[in-house]
Image: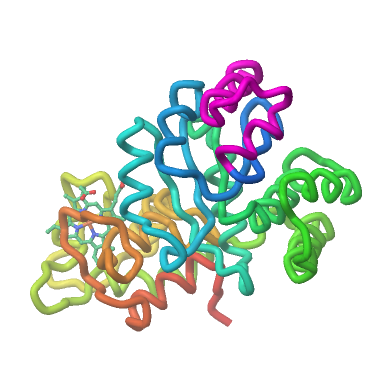
Amino acid sequence: MKRILLSMVAVVGGLSAPTAEQSASGSIRNFLQVNTDFCTGGQPRPEAFAALKSNGVRSVLNLRTPGEYREPDERAAAEQAGLKYFNLPVVYTDPRDEQVTEFLRLSDDPANRPMFIHCTAAIRVGAFWLIRRVVRDGWTWDAAIAEARKVGLVNAPHLEEFAKRYVGAQTGSSSGPSASLDYQFFKTRVQPIFVARRPGHARCVACHAAGTPLRLQPLAPGSTTWSEEDSRRNFEAVRRLVVPGSVKSRLLVHPLAEEAGGDFYHNGGKHWSAQDDPEWQTLKAWVLGQTTK
Ligand code: HEC
């Protein structure tokens, strides 16, 4: 992969490229291949995607917010080139822990590798990559930050602070993942949402008690709640659609309108048109690890 990617850089840069970094600078700003599975950089031009693809890259992860660039154009260019495309909108001044969780999840998935990760100038990318080096590859902070500077993490003390705090919280506790799903909260707060009626829609349970990939237990006729045993089964079924701590969990994005941050199609309709909907907020709270006190 490494040699292939280096030749890609030359192609993209249109140069006979003495080194990867030099040639990349002519095409993708701050391009760097950090290992065989990942390369990083700033905003690519649309033509770059075909070259990335033909040299083995499988997916693109963009950390810019949609207001910063033409999201539909970039997605179309990447997908047209045959690349999987992900956008994690990280606000430069306000990165979020749950975005790191999602970043790790996407970059953990072998099906998404090799991956090209970009933002504008690879500053945000540097901070997120730094975290990955420490929490996944076990690098020391010093080694990881030295590499992150090459990736592009410069003049952004707030992002270094963010990374340091995230890493500290992960490595300082032995309690595993930062969020875990609470059963009682699910039973008392989440399940009622599956039974509730929303104008213009069938109830979740009307479809999801049979024949759909998300399989809830059927409700006894006339009943609006599940038994303890069935609630446990529902919990197991629904948790498969959740990445604890991730607001991109399928449970959250699938029934949410696309304009509000949802994905583009759910056979059962878009039940919530905005993220401030109380029901959606309840689902989100559960995904982020809220418990009943
Ligand atoms: C009219 C029937 C219908 C209703 C009502 C409905 N769904 Fe669905 N849902 C489906 C079907 C069919 C699929 C599979 C196809 C798809 O992904 O669109 C699905 C898929 C899903 C998935 C993805 C499952 C997977 O394994 O990938 C989630 C999550 C989901 N629904 C949640 C909900 C929630 C929450 C509600 C209620 C707010 C709801 N659905 C209401 C029919 C429905």
Left or right, 258 with respect to 10, comes to left
**Is 84 colored magenta in this rendering?**
no
Q: Which of the 4 image quadrants contains residue 256?
A: bottom left
Q: Going 28% across and 69% down the picture, which residue do you hit? A: 259
Nearest the camera: 273 or 95? Answer: 95
Quadrant in which the N terminus is drawn = top right
**Looking at this rendering, what residue extends furthest in the front direction?**
15
**Residue, x 35% and y 30% (percent of image)?**
82
Q: Is residue 93 above or below residue 4?
A: below
Position of 214 compared to 160: left or right?
left
Q: Is residue 48 above or below residue 180?
A: above
On the picture, is 9 further left or further right than 44? right
Q: Position of residue 276 (x, y in %)?
A: 37, 82
Relative vertical location of residue 20 with respect to residue 283 in this rendering, above or below: above
Q: Nearer the viewer, residue 259 or 62?
A: 62
Per the picture, the main secondary structure of the magenta-coloured stretch is helix
Q: Nearer the viewer, residue 26 or 92?
A: 26
Q: Provide residue 207's location: percent of width, then percent of height.
A: 15, 56
> Residue 90 occupies which quadrant of the picture?
bottom right
Which quadrant of the render holds ligand 1?
bottom left
Q: Is residue 7 magenta?
A: yes
Where in the figure is residue 98, as x and y percent of width and height? 57, 63
Tell how many labels. 0
Left or right of 279 in this view: 44: right
Q: How has the structure been colored for display?
A: rainbow
Which quarter of the rendering shows the C terminus?
bottom right
Span highlighted in magenta in the image: 1-28
Residue at the spot 46% in from the left edge and 27% down from the top edge? 51
Q: Is residue 70 above or below residue 130?
A: below
